[in-house]
Image: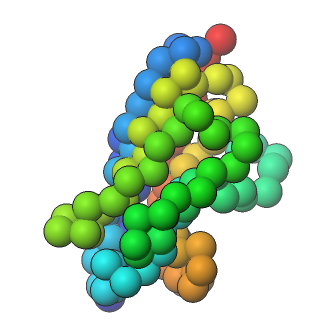
Amino acid sequence: QVHLVESGGGLVQAGGSLRLSCAASGIIFRIRAMGWYRQAPGKQRELVAAITSGGSTNYADSVKGRFTISRDNAKNTVYLQMNSLKPEDTAVYYCNDPLNELKDYWGQGTQVTVSS
C-alpha cells in the first residue's frame, strides 16, 4: 500500500522558516523523482520544487533562492526547507512524484500559514 505522509507545517511570521517532511512507503523511493506541491485557497495546485532520483533539483521562480528540496533515500523521505517565508507562501503543501504521478495516493498535506 502506497502512503505519502506530509508533516512539519505550522504558523510562522513572515521572514521565518519551516522544514517540511514527506515520508513515503509502498514505493521504490530511490528510483523516483519527488516534488513538493502547494495549493492555496481558490487556486490550482502548483509544483514548487522537485528533485530527481539522482539529486538534481528544480524550483518554481516564486520560491527560488528561498526553498531547498532534499531527499534521504535511506529514510524514504523528502524534505523542503523553507526560508524567508512570505504570506503568499500560505497553502497546503503536498508531495508526489512529478514525473509519474501517484494519482490515487495524494496525502493529507500539511498546512503552512505565514502571517504578515
Specify whether residue 75 is in view. yes
Q: Is residue 75 left or right of residue 17?
A: left
Residue 19 drawn above or below residue 30: above
Choose top left, top right, bottom left or bottom right for residue 2: bottom left
- Name which residue lies at 59% across and 57% down: 58
Q: Measured from the top left, where is residue 76 in percent x and y?
A: 26, 69
Q: Measured from the top left, where is residue 9 in percent x and y?
A: 43, 38
Q: Residue furthest left?
A: 74
Quarter of the image for the C terminus: give it. top right
Specify whether residue 112 is in view. no
Q: Measured from the top left, where is residue 1 in percent x and y?
A: 32, 88
Q: Number of labelled discs?
A: 0
Choose top left, top right, bottom left or bottom right for residue 27: bottom left
- Name which residue lies at 55% across and 22% down: 84
Residue 93 drawn above or below residue 16: below
Q: In this view, does 39 lie to the left or right of 97?
A: right
Residue 88 drawn above or below residue 14: below
- Rendering colour mode: rainbow
Q: Measured from the top left, where is residue 97 in percent x and y?
A: 52, 75
- Name which residue lies at 32% across and 71% down: 24
Q: Looking at the image, which is closer to me, 103 or 57?
A: 57
Residue 115 drawn above or below residue 53: above
- Name which residue lies at 54% across and 15% down: 15
Q: In this view, does 114 lie to the left or right of 78?
A: right
